[in-house]
Image: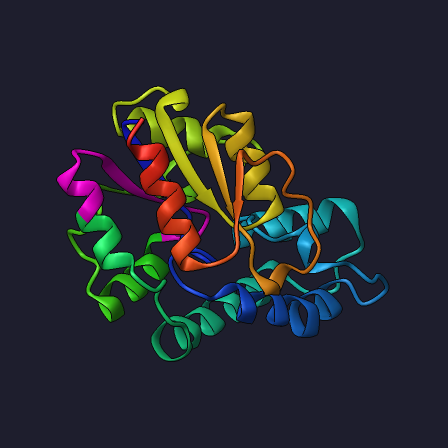
Amino acid sequence: MSAVLFDMDGVLVDSEDYWVAFLEEKILPTTVPDEEIPASEASGMNFREIYDYLEAEYDTALSRETFESMFHEMARELYTERVTLLEGLYDLLAELEARGITTAVVTSAPHEWIELVFDRFDLEGRFDHVISADDIDADGKPAPDIFEHAAAETGSEPTDCVVVEDSENGVRAASRAETTVIAYRIDAHGEIDLSPADDIVDSPAELRDAVLELASH
């Protein structure tokens, strides 16, 4: 393997606990008050694409401007005050660098949110590439486009990349891109279908071992 591509929300930081609650308790009931929609239906998508999806599939009761404003406000609070970093991440990145493995953050989050996380946890310069869904004019997860783009950015074939994802849409996207997929199972998502993944891990230690095992091949 020549590159490891990490999702941000739910993998690098434990933000999915908060985002899922935000979706279930505030965003979805407010935007689509006449439907009961599980958060997993939208998890992994860029927040703008969530609105596109809801608008296309349901009757939306919230304007796009208000919807996006609610997300930006939540993001500022979430990333600067609430989330914690994946245990052992600095050491894992240092080990991958020592082995000559390229690393990238590949996320549906916009760059302004990524910067909040990087500033808080001193991640600037620790990854070789930082890729947001906003960087490409293509379909979001579960489409494979962002991972195909990320592989090209790292100078790798998708089949030479390991992707670490936590959401069902993210796992499906990485699998469709023909990468090797490690699914990081977290409580926030409940029972979701991670079967397209090549490996499923349940803790930071298991994640580290799985990444380093695959990176050695």
The residue positioned 39% from the left and 53% from the top of the image is: 110
The residue positioned 65% from the left and 68% from the top of the image is: 27
Residue 44 appears in the picture as rendered: yes
Q: Position of residue 215 (x, y in %)?
A: 31, 34
**Which of these two is toward me, 77 or 103?**
103
Name the quadrant containing residue 114: bottom left
The residue positioned 56% from the left and 60% from the top of the image is: 186
In the image, residue 167 above or below residue 155? below
Q: Position of residue 139 (x, y in %)?
A: 54, 33
> Which residue of the protein is positioned furthest toward the bottom in this rendering?
81
Q: Which residues are magenta?
A: 95-110
Is residue 104 one of those drawn in magenta?
yes
Is residue 114 one of those drawn in magenta?
no
In the image, residue 168 above or below residue 203? above
The quadrant of the rendering that contains the C terminus is top left
Q: Position of residue 197 (x, y in %)?
A: 56, 36
The residue positioned 35% from the left and 23% from the top of the image is: 160
> Which residue of the protein is positioned furthest toward the right in this rendering?
34
Q: Position of residue 194 (x, y in %)?
A: 63, 43
Q: Seen in the image, is 94 located left or right of residue 36?
A: left
In the image, residue 120 above or below residue 144? below
